[in-house]
Amino acid sequence: MSSPQDLVKGILEHIEPDQKESLREGLKNTPKRVVESWKELYSGYNQDPKDTLKATFNGEGYDGIVLLKDIEFYSTCEHHMLSFTGKAHVAYIPTERIVGISKLARIVEIYSRRLQNQERITTQVADALEKYLKPLGAAIIIEAKHDCMGCRGVKKSHATMTTSAMRGVFFDKAEARSELMDLIKN
């Protein structure tokens, strides 16, 4: 079986067929750099959301919405292996336990650092919040621009895709959903 670097070299030779004998200087170390970049780009496969959400604190009776908005993220489309980037808004209504706010950003990071589609990230984050925090409600809204839409195919680079997942009271109660949307807008 070929090494990951050999596979990248093969891709480069496919893209630039006249380089088969010897890659030009600018490409010589590209296979190594690509494989190194994959470690960061796909680091979500090596992380368990349970480990991130297990460190909770006494909520001291707080029963309002906890919202972390505008969480920047980067992911890779599983269909074309091109990037998509955007922001996520993550919210929950605690029962007894709360989690540090950085953990909300880390959950988005764990799932976005995998070969993905936006819909799956949205569902996975909401499911993880619901499973590990057991809140009254959990919600996530993601807005992203997809390079597969901008640099190929339909070539609409300014289009933004929005996905959402609402669980618990955010799904069942229009007032809770409305309050959440007002908080995100402000």
Image (cartoon, grey):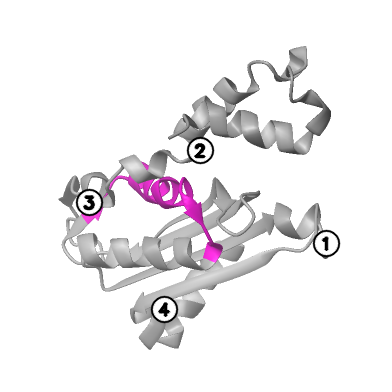
Q: Return the residue at label 1.
A: 156
Would residue 146 appear left or right of 186 to someone viewing this image? right
Judge from the rendering whether residue 17 lies leftward or rightward of residue 63; answer left or right: right
Calculate the distance from the C-alpha at mark 2 to the C-alpha at mark 3. Answer: 20 Å
Indicate the secondary structure of the residue bearing disc 2.
Answer: helix
Q: Earlier in the sequence, mark 1 or mark 3?
A: 3
For marks 1 and 2, the one nearer the N-term is 2
Q: Which mark is residue 41?
A: 2
Number of marks in picture: 4
Q: Nearer the viewer, residue 179 or 129?
A: 129
In the image, residue 107 lies in the stretch drawn in magenta: yes
Residue at which label 4 appears = 176
> Magenta stretch: residue 46 in it?
no
Q: Which residues are magenta?
A: 98-118
**SS at mark 3 in the image:** helix
Q: Residue at x 83, y 65 (%)?
A: 154
Which label belongs to residue 134?
A: none
